[in-house]
Image (spheres, rainbow, N blue to C red):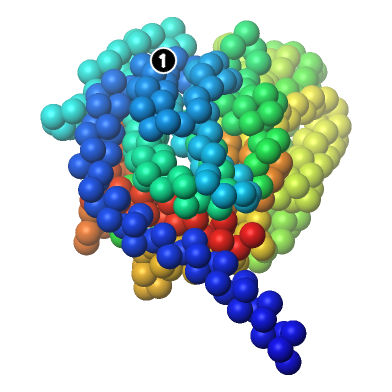
Amino acid sequence: MKKLILPLFLISTMAFGQTNLRPQIDQKASEIESKVIEWRRDIHQNPELGNQEFRTAKKIADHLRSLGIEVKENMAVTGVVGYLKGGKPGPTVALRADMDALPVTERGDLPFKSTVTTVYNGQETGVMHACGHDTHVAILMGVAEILASMKDQLEGNVKFIFQPAEEGINEEGVTTWGAKQLVEEGVMEDVDAIFGLHISAQTEVGTIGYRPGPAQAAVDNLEIIVHGTQAHGASPWSGVDPIVTASQIVTGLQTILSRSVNITQNPAVVTIGAIHGGIRHNIIPEKVEMIGTIRTFGDEQQALVHKRITEIATNIAESAGARAEVNIQKLYPSTVNDLELTAKMVPTLEAAAGKDHVRVNPPVTGAEDFSFYQREKPGLFIGLGGMKKGGDPTKTPSHHTPDFYIDESGFILGLRVMSYFVVDYMGMK
C-alpha cells in the first residue's frame, strides 16, 4: 500500500508545485491588462497583411528582448519566435499568436479605427484586423511578460511563436501559410506541446470553448472543368452540352453529404462558388469551369469526400458524352485537438474561467493553420469569448466583416488561460 500512495503523493506535489503559480499569474495579469489593451489598439490601428507585418514584428521583438527573452526574427518571412529558458529542467511548451490582418475596409467610429489602405488583387481596399489577430498578439505579448517575471520558478521552457500569414499568401501561383512555413523551418522540433487561442466575436466574454479531436475543418479548393462539344443553341443534339452536364454534377455533389458521409460523426461541406461557361445566348459552349470549396474533418473523411467528388463528376460527364477534369488543391488540414492533451487540460480551462464558463463547442467549418503545428506535436486550440456581456451572437458582426468588434474586457482571461497552460503542463511532466 505504501508503494502505491508514495508515487501518487509525489505526482500530486509536482503538479501543485506549478499550479501554485496561478495566484502570481492572476495578479500580474491584472497589473498589465491595460497595457495589453493599449498594445492591441496600436496594432489594430496599424494593421499589416500577411508577410508584411514588419511594424508588428518589430514591436513584438523589442518587447521580448526587453524581458530578457531570446529572439529570432524573420522566421517564415516576418515571424518572430521568442525562447524563454526556465529556471528548472522540464518540457518546452509553445504558445502561438497570428499577426496578419485582412483586406477589409473598417466601418464604425472606434478611436483606434484603421485607416490603412492598400491595393489587393488589383483593387484598392482598406486593411483591417477583422479576425482578431491583433488581440492574439497583444495577449501573447502579455503572457510573455507574465512568464518572464517568474522564469526562475518555471520547470521547463517556453517558446513564443508570433506567426505571419495565417490567412494564407499566394505568390506566383503558390499558396502557403505562416504555420506551414514555420514548421518547415523547424520551429516545432524541440517542442513537447503547443497551445493557441482564437478570439470569438460570437462568444460572450469570460467564456472558453474547446472541442476534443477534430475541431475545425480541413479546407481544400475544388476546380471542375467540363469539356463538351460546341454547337448551335437551336440544335443541341449536334453537340455535347457542358452546361447541362455541369448542372447535373452540382446536384450530384450534394449526395456526397446526404449519402456518403456519416454526418452523425462529423459534418462536411462541398460548395460550388462560381460557374463560368458560354458567351452568347444561342451558342452551346465547348467547356464550363466550376470552382468551389471543400470542408472536412479528419484525414479519413477528407479522402472519402475527395474520392466521391472525382467519381461523381467524371461518371456524370461520361454518361452525357462529356469529360470532366477534377482538380483538388489541399490547403489547411483539419485542426485536431489531441485527445489526451485536451483531457488533461480541461481542469486548467475550468480553473481559468470557472467550470460554468467552459463549454464544448460544435465542429467549426472554418479552417485554421494551427493545424500544421498539431501535425508535428500534441496541440490544443481553444476559443476565447470576445462578445460583450448579454450580446446576441446572431446580431453581432462576424469575423472577416467591416463591423467586426471585440470586447476588450475578455483579454484578461486570455492572459490567465495561456499562462496557466504553461505552468500546469510543466507540472504534469
Apparent side of residue 26 relative to residue 319 in the rendered image (left or right): left
Of 269 and 252, nearer the camera is 269
**Residue 223 % position (x, y):** 69, 26
Of 132 and 221, nearer the camera is 132
Apparent side of residue 50 relative to residue 262 in the rendered image (left or right): left
Residue beneath the point at 35% across and 33% down: 134
**Residue 301 % position (x, y):** 74, 51
Of 65 and 46, nearer the camera is 65
Apparent side of residue 384 relative to residue 213 in the rendered image (left or right): left
Residue holding disc 1? 54
**Name of the residue lying farthest toward the bottom:** 1
Q: Is residue 411 visible?
A: yes
Apparent side of residue 140 relative to residue 77 in the rendered image (left or right): left
- Disc 1 marks a residue whose amino acid type is Phe
Residue beneath the point at 20% across and 42% down: 34
Would you identify the image quadrant in which residue 226 lies?
top right
**Residue 326 % position (x, y):** 77, 28
Would you identify the image quadrant in which residue 61 lies?
top left
| Residue 53 in the image: above or below residue 368 | above
Q: Residues within 10 Å of mark 1 (few under 14, many from 20)?
A: some
Residue beneath the point at 57% across and 56% down: 426
